[in-house]
Amino acid sequence: AQTVTQSQPEMSVQEAETVTLSCTYDTSENNYYLFWYKQPPSRQMILVIRQEAYKQQNATENRFSVNFQKAAKSFSLKISDSQLGDTAMYFCAFFTYGGSQGNLIFGKGTKLSVKP
Amino acid sequence: DAEITQSPRHKITETGRQVTLACHQTWNHNNMFWYRQDLGHGLRLIHYSYGVQDTNKGEVSDGYSVSRSNTEDLPLTLESAASSQTSVYFCASSESGTTEAFFGQGTRLTVV
């Protein structure tokens, strides 16, 4: 079975600084996707960034980037130039293919607070 | 615009009652998921479906059931509500062969 572990229940960062959120996962699959989702106080789940396991290049979306280490099964999220609007719960997620099907498993989340 | 909607947004029910939470998506996605979100547990998968007439149990399926009679809807039923089922419930959908999941706004259920 696949598992996703986020070891940091809470983190804080000063506005404009950089913060890294950790995520590790366990799987025997070779083909999969990894995601970071953001959940602000509005409760809406928002996709931040995704990484295909077969790609060696780390994904980047504006101020958000990942450090994907496939052998170590590690998938950390770096937020640069943190903004007050980045305050939210962040969930790491793992998606597998099974034929044309898929399943999406989440970690327990990291609560990020950006301080002015 | 295509979307996924959950109803109701909030519900209070009594222990032992049957409750159904609705989820409707207009993307024509084959995959649909139900999660519950609890403090300290993240999102845990309850049930999922890969298409009409297909349903599968997730990590925390006891006390819940789903049925998929069409592509657009995956209602979640609590057969006999318990206080342990007080939670926020999220429905999500994704297209077969792609991976991005779209989430509803969530339903806050309180069992008293």
Image (cartoon, coloured by chain):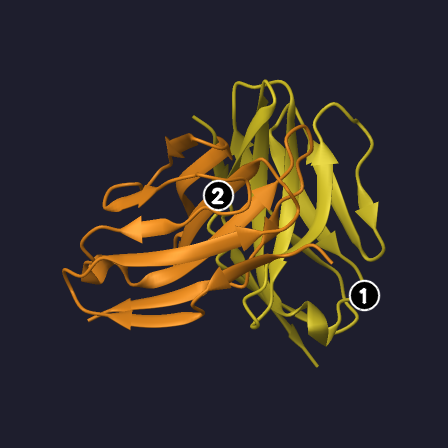
Chain colours: A yellow, B orange
Q: Amino acid at mark 2?
A: Phe
Describe the element under mark 2 as helix, strand or loop.
strand
Chain identity of mark 1: A
Task: Report crowding for label 2: few under 14, some 14 to 19, many 20 or more residues within 10 A (C-alpha).
Answer: many
Can residue B52 be seen here? The reply is yes
Q: Are marks 2 and 1 in contact (CB under 8 Å)?
A: no
Q: Please tell me whether residue A56 is drawn above or below residue A30 in the rendered image.
A: below
Outermost residue to the front: B69
Outermost residue to the bottom: A116
- Name the residue located 64 percent from the left edge and 42 percent from the top edge: B28
Outermost residue to the right: A62
Q: Which residue is mark 2?
A: B33
Image check: A91 left or right of B79?
right
Can residue B43 be seen here? The reply is no
Quadrant (top left, top right, bottom left, bottom right) of the C terminus of chain B: bottom left
> Which residue is nearer to you in this view: A53 or B69?
B69
- Name the residue located 70 percent from the left edge and 27 percent from the top edge: A53
Image check: B1 left or right of A1?
right
Q: Amino acid at mark 1?
A: Asp
- Residue B36 numbered mark, or none: none
Residue A90 drawn at (x, y percent): 59, 57
Describe the element under mark 1 as helix, strand or loop.
loop
> How far apart are the two marked residues, 2 and 1, measured between alpha carbons?
34 Å
Residue A76 drawn at (x, y percent): 66, 44
Chain identity of mark 2: B
Looking at the rendered structure, the number of numbered marks drawn on it comes to 2
> Which residue is nearer to you in this view: A74 or B24?
B24
Q: Which residue is mark 1?
A: A81
Closer mark to the observer between disc 2 and disc 1: 2
